[in-house]
Amino acid sequence: MSHSHSHDHSHSHDHSHDDHSHSHDDHSHSHDDHSHSHDDHSHSHDHLAPPVPSPHPPLERGSGLGKLLFFDTPSGISGDMTLGALLDLGVPLEVVTGAVDRLGLDGYRLERLPARTGVLGGTRFLVHVDGSQPERNYATIDRLIAAAGLDAAVETLARRIFRRLAEAEAEVHRTTVESVSFHEVGAVDSIVDIVGAAACFVYLGARVVATPLPVGRGSVNCRHGVLPLPAPATLVCLRGIPTYDPGFDAELVTPTGAVILATVAEQFVRWPSFAPERVGLGVGTRVFADRPNGLRVVLGVAERAFDRSEPSHVVLEANVDDMTGELAGHAIEAMLAAGALDCWAAPVTMKKGRPGLVISLLTEIARADELSRALLRETSSIGVRRIAADRLERPRHRVRVSTAFGEVSVKVSEGDFGPAQVKPEFDECAVLARAAGVTVREVIAAAALAHAQGKFARS
């Protein structure tokens, strides 16, 4: 007999523990239907027609390039709701099934259903698992994804997400990442959620932003007994991410939902400055007394970087004709240490034919006064020019990778500007090169290869 699981809420743990899982939808609250009355509209939940599929035509690959994909999370987030919302938005189901099928798993089937939460229509995504599944540890799952022949960007993102989840579980259980196991159904559910979501994000190509997350309190029953909410692994995955109390006890954010959003979202805001174009709703099965149980994703055009009424940055410039190269180099280092985003020097010919330098730096407008004083202090100039500026940035993040020479920090700059820029930290590579007696180029190449192969170090 086939049985259905809300697959994204399972927890993994080390081999010394019994299997446990719990679901955002399993801990259901029973509420009577409720209606909202307002001056200009009212809703009745009674006698609603069955929900119909999303009215959106399928989105084409790259439809999100140059746009924002906003996750609105008043009812939290889970893996199945993430996939439901992205499918409801218009990502073709084949994007998910095509990626997951490459993994070669069996004993499961995927289902996309039109669904309703209150009066709102959306999409529910389910994984049905037939019979038992083998126990899979993190290393096994990582090898499975690496060997599947996925699109390189999908593989890299999926492995990043799984690594972060495994590290959270290892921290919670006080064990090593290699010892973390995703048991039976939970492994299949997590694999489908993470690989399927990674395929959707890469297919769209949009920048992802999200609201702060509502973290419910209370407790949840699992095979280990009672766990506190937020679930321990969820809490670790949310390190550094803004959260708030929704006002009632429930599990609203699951480990898989948390780790997906924590990995892909570049910013957490109440609402971004953008023009919405299309909305998708991923529907959960629980009923809440005060809100729909849905994850809303909104695809839209972001406020362009150069449309601001006020500049966001300034370029500060100082002309000097009596500083040596050593002093100019020291001034550049001092400006960077003081917080300049960038600093450089360019040769110029000054009055009476004297050779000189223009020392320039870029800073946020709020720090212009502070950096102007620093520039006057560190150079022989008697004046600083300010030029209003704005800039369009690639979203970036740092990861640590493991190489034969040791761990290296790598800066990854992404966005819809072509292939990602991957830059190992030079100073760290230089230290490792000296220790190993090799060239810096060899360490840099090893770090870049380790990133491409997903050999991320434990953070």
Image: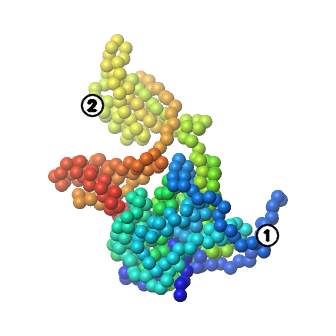
Q: Is residue 12 left or right of residue 441?
A: right
425 relative to 417 in the view: left or right: left
At label 1, the amino acid type is Ser
- Disc number at residue 44? 1
User: Residue at image x 48%, y 74%?
Assistant: 189
Q: Quadrant of the C terminus?
A: bottom left
* Residue 418 in view, yes or no: yes
34 horizontally vs 210: left or right: right
Residue type for callout 2: Glu
- Which mark, residue 198? none
* Mark 1 residue element: loop
- Report which residue position mark 2 lands on: 326
Vertical comparison of 355 with 118: above or below: above
Q: Residue furthest left?
A: 437
Secondary structure, mark 2, is helix
Q: Kindly indicate whether the residue at mark 1 contacts the one at mark 2 (C-beta within 8 angstroms).
A: no
Identity of the residue drawn at 59% across and 38% down: 308
Give the alpha-carbon distance from disc 2 to disc 1, as whole Å: 76 Å
